[in-house]
Amino acid sequence: MSIKSLPNLVFIFADQFREESLPTRDPDVIAPNLQRLIDEGVSLTRTYTSNPVCTPARASIISGLYAHTHGLITNNLRLRTDITSIAHIYRNHGYQTGYIGKWHLDGEEKPGFVPPGPRRQGFDYWAAFNRGHNYWNSVYYRNEAEPIHENGYEPDYQTDLAVSFIENNKDRPFCLFMSWGPPHTPFYPAQGRDARWGDLRPESIHLRPNVPDTEAEKAREELAGYNTHITALDDNLGKVIDKLDILGLSENTILVFSSDHGDMLGSQALYRKGQPLEEAIHIPFILKYPDKLGRGLENDVLFHTVDFMPTLLALSGLEWPDAVQGNDLSQALIHNDPTLGPEAVYIQGKMGKAEEFRAVRSKHHLLAVKLSDLQTTHLYDTTEDPFERSNKAGHPDNEELERQLRNLLFQFASETKDKLVTERIEETSS
């Protein structure tokens, strides 16, 4: 494949954006450009994070490795520099690589200057910062430690930088990652508003059935702010889609919209992430690539963040290291055939000092265990109970199902060399 025929990649991900808040799923979400992307691309409706916390998930997205392999099992750790990232591979094939926005792979520093070199993991153009959420008074860094201050809403200027990057590299293949901070907290629903965001009325928000009445008022207030962020992001997504169209790059560009993890937003009386529950682990993955894929398709192949790297590289006609643990599901996309995917995905997590867990998510069930003693904590039939309101863990009537799912989880642990699990299996069986 000649360098001129290589497809571009634009990978946009919004922090803490859950699948349930796409405009196709939530009537309160105003997002015409997301709807446009859905109508023009392929929606992978069964996409899950491999770890519902920022740092581990982001490391998996760029490395194709599970958290127990890349080593970032919770937030604010630094990714080691001996890992081959997706950007290294694109760069090695002549691509201009770029990263814009929140990084969250370089330790505790906040906002944090990531110096040029190995800690940028193969991204050459850099307009980013390590971590933080300060959407109306934010900074970013280029190649010097002096912060660059910007006024206005953070995703607006980040998108302007992305559009300029695309314009400046239109005559060569490029790989651009853009990480928006919203709809992650803070919501600030009254700050920085303008006419494009519409009128916020929390009382009109429709809640998921698993939000208890005791949480209804708080959940509606949060969802009003969350949805406001989504509408503002959607406006910026439209700028990227339009620029690719204007430059004649749309046919040969892989354009992705996704996230690192979701947000409970009051479901099960819980908030934020770190839970082996649908609102925290189920994320969007919408892919537009007219040169190879169809339009307006839904595909329920089981897919997760560890699979992003090999699948995108395969669609680009590029290879990846043997060490990558994710699956190449490009054929499931090209043929729109979910049967070409796995029977389940493996999920692990830890939020702060909370108990670490392991989980498996199939199309019809979810099971999670505590890492400390491998006891089952969650078991849901997500077909008959999509809002996970009836936890069947430990119920005698479900012993055989629980046994099968536990065996599947332990098989994943063995195949991925998750020693913290396999060692405990040996301990409990001896």
Image: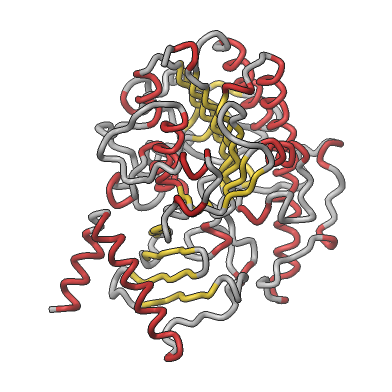
Which residue is at a point 58% across and 57% down the rendered structure image? 263
Give residue 4's position: percent from left, percent from top.
49, 11
Instruction: Judge left or right: residue 64 versus residue 269.
Output: left
Which residue is at a point 36% across and 75% down the rendered structure image? 404
- Position of residue 386 relative to residue 56, above or below, is below
What is the quadrant of residue 123 in the picture? Answer: top left
Which residue is at a point 38% across and 19% down the rendered structure image? 91
- Position of residue 57 relative to residue 134, above or below, is below
Give residue 1's position: percent from left, percent from top.
41, 16
Q: Which residue is nearer to you in this view: 76 or 53?
A: 53
Give residue 209's position: percent from left, percent from top.
70, 72
Instruction: Judge left or right: residue 66 versus residue 419.
Output: right
Instruction: Judge left or right: residue 128 versus residue 166.
Output: left
Give residue 165's position: percent from left, percent from top.
57, 16
Instruction: Judge left or right: residue 39 versus residue 320.
Output: right
Quarter containing the C terminus? bottom left
Which residue is at a point 67% across and 37% down the rendered structure image? 295
